[in-house]
Amino acid sequence: MEENKRKRRQIFAPRMQKKLVVLFVIVLLAFAGLGARLVFIVTENKNEYQKQVLSQQAYNSVVIPFKRGDIYDANGTIMATSEKVYNLVVDAKVMTNNGKANKGKDNATREDLEKYIAPTMQALDEYFDLDMDKIREHVIKNASKSSWYVVQKRMSYEEVKPFKDAQAENPSIRGIWFEEEYKRLYPNGTMASDILGFTSRDSNGIYGLEEYYNEDLNGINGREYGYLEEDLTLERTLKPAIDGYNIHSTIDMNIQRIVEKHLLAFNEKQKNTVITANGAENVGCVIMDVDSGRVLAMAGYPCFDPNDTWNTDALLGTRMVEMVTNSAGYQELHKTNTYIDQNVIDQMDDAQLELNLQNLWKNFCITGTYEPGSTIKPFTVASALEMGAITKHSTFECKGSLEIGGYTIKCHNRDDGVLGLEAAVAKSCNVAMMKIAQIVGAEDFCEYQQNFNFGLKTNIDLAGEARTVNLIYNADDMGPTDLATNSFGQNFNVSMIQMISGFCSLINGGYYYEPHMVDKITNASGVVIENREPRVLKQTISESTSELIRQYCNAVVEYGTGKTARPVGYRIGGKTGTAETIDENTHKRHPDEYVVSFMGYAPADHPEIAIYVVVDRPNAAKQDDAKFATYLVRDILTEVLPYMNIYPTEEMPVQTEAPKETPQPTQTPVPAL
């Protein structure tokens, strides 16, 4: 036994014991060195690490919103602007002394309730119309949490100022913030809504100038944030917001007001005449400077209020639309035979309502397509003259119809006999146009269509312009009947902006200007960032041909189909148009539905402005009457020409009776400028 004890005592031999002592010393020294290093790091970098810890405290940055740029008319009148608004925010933790009094407890203490919550709640109740029980419950339950609770949005400065003054005077009112943002305003209500479009809550433009110039109108948000100086004091840094650019449009709001007044009066006169609906499916008017492409006015009816885009009142009287799947398997918008009243609106689900509102928000003057009818005849004649297929002395015999491609195509006139070019245009002879097109031929005819930008976008600076490349013929696809009907404005589609842009080149010497809505862009300080000068894209016809077209169009108003478009005291020129519509269900020509129009200019000898009015399916027993358009042109020009200081070309007759009253609008009236 004694021997075994001795063996156990000799387990760690002297040599091993020395090694263990050395290892222990090494480990001890390593820990000592590590401790020294930590002391050195803490001593030398104390402030840096303390900053990192403190910087993780609640020094949250605050976004400073930019102001979206304003939109002005040609005279400096504001069409769209942005107003600063305030969101009321409650922070329960700050209200209860940043959570110190309640020491991390979930609910507020009696001390918190008496010192801060009671006076703050009293002030909120005094200056705002709020659910105070709900707010008080939220604050008490979230006293230890930094809770960002928005209780009311988009208040004006006048609404929040009394509370802010009370808050500045009483330090016990705390934990209430006002988050800033901007609200888009359209001071003129429905006026120019098709031109302007509107914006979403996040300042993105939808339709019109708002969408097309969205990047220019939007700015860059600023930011206010805090950081710690070397002495650990909190400093606040402000990075200011950069406001968006301002857009200066070509629109003259005085002319725009005149146009919209008469479109509304037309609707009041014609609505519910045959069916319980608006005065027409669509009515549009564009007025353009013939020597620059500047759009002076553009309006359609029905319109909407960009301040209240989801207001369903604007849908009343319109035709309901739905999305259907066509034969190719694609979704397309389809017009139903239902006209919207309040009962129809009440039965719509959200998707149907939004679809119909989206259809309302579109600008008919650039998105709507239709057959132009006889307004195309000056283009047909100009093309043939320009290529030398006919001369100004050419004559054509009309016997009331013409056999082409196995079809008998009629003229609206019975038997005009032999007509020169002037009379053919003035009397709107289909037979003469068909014979001219036969001489020109399909290839040259289609070339001149594209020369006037039919089938192509004009690239006007508005969002949503219709693409019509598939709505016109190519020479390879055009048969003799297609060529004949195209010559007088059937079997191909155009848009209003295409027609008036091309027409200006017909009467201004042949110069095709790119239509535009904006003259210049400025920054918030008024410095010009960009000037948008008129752009001549091409010359469509010669000056001599243009002079002949003016002569023929003057005759239209003097003794032809457009006599009723003439305002008293002025000589103007132009061309009427009547076109059948295509039934969307049968895809055949509808026997009773028409698009009527008048495209003209003033003064007759030296045109300064062009005007184009389209009335799509007027609410009348007999729709194929161009007077629906010519009367509108006459009434609009009667006011617009004197306003523009375009003097009468003839002696004004003495008025012998009081003028007829204009029907009073039922919508919110457009404010006078």
Image (spheres, grey):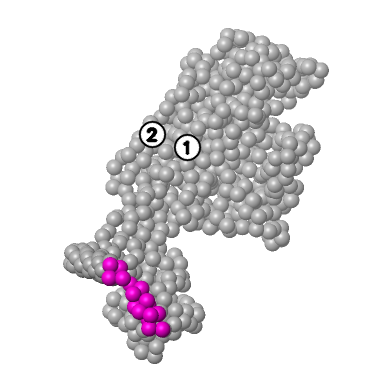
Q: Position of residue 510 (x, y in %)?
A: 49, 20
Q: Position of residue 432 (x, y in %)?
A: 68, 17
Depth check: give the residue in front, 153 or 622: 153
The reply to whether callout 2 and callout 1 are in contact (CB within 8 Å) is: yes
Q: Which residues are magenta?
A: 1-16
Which of the image's four quarters has the N terminus? Answer: bottom left
The vertical placement of 359 against 508, above or below, is below
Q: Position of residue 412 (x, y in %)?
A: 73, 25
Question: Magenta segment: does it hold 168?
Answer: no
What amino acid is found at the position of numbered circle 1 in the picture? Answer: Asp
Residue at the image point whose x is 48% and y is 32% from the top = 515
Circle 2 Cα neighbour tier, 10 Å, few/some/many (<14 / 14–19 / ≥20): few
Q: Is residue 44 left or right of residue 263?
A: left
Question: Magenta segment: does it hold 10?
Answer: yes
The vertical placement of 495 against 508, above or below, is below
Q: Position of residue 414 (x, y in %)?
A: 76, 22
Residue at the image point whose x is 37% and y is 66% from the top = 157
Query: How many labels sit on residues?
Result: 2
**Residue 384 visible here:** yes
What amino acid is found at the position of numbered circle 2 in the picture? Answer: Arg
Residue at the image point whose x is 58% and y is 58% from the top = 311
Residue designated by label 2: 532
Depth check: give the residue in front, 173 or 111: 111
Residue designated by label 1: 461
Residue at the image point whose x is 45% and y is 38% from the top = 517
In the current view of this chain or complex, which residue is farthest to the right?
406
Depth check: give the residue in front, 584 or 2: 2
Secondary structure beneath dot 1 equals loop
Q: Is residue 172 left or right of residue 285?
A: left
Magenta segment, prevailing SS (helix, strand or loop): helix
Secondary structure beneath dot 2 equals loop
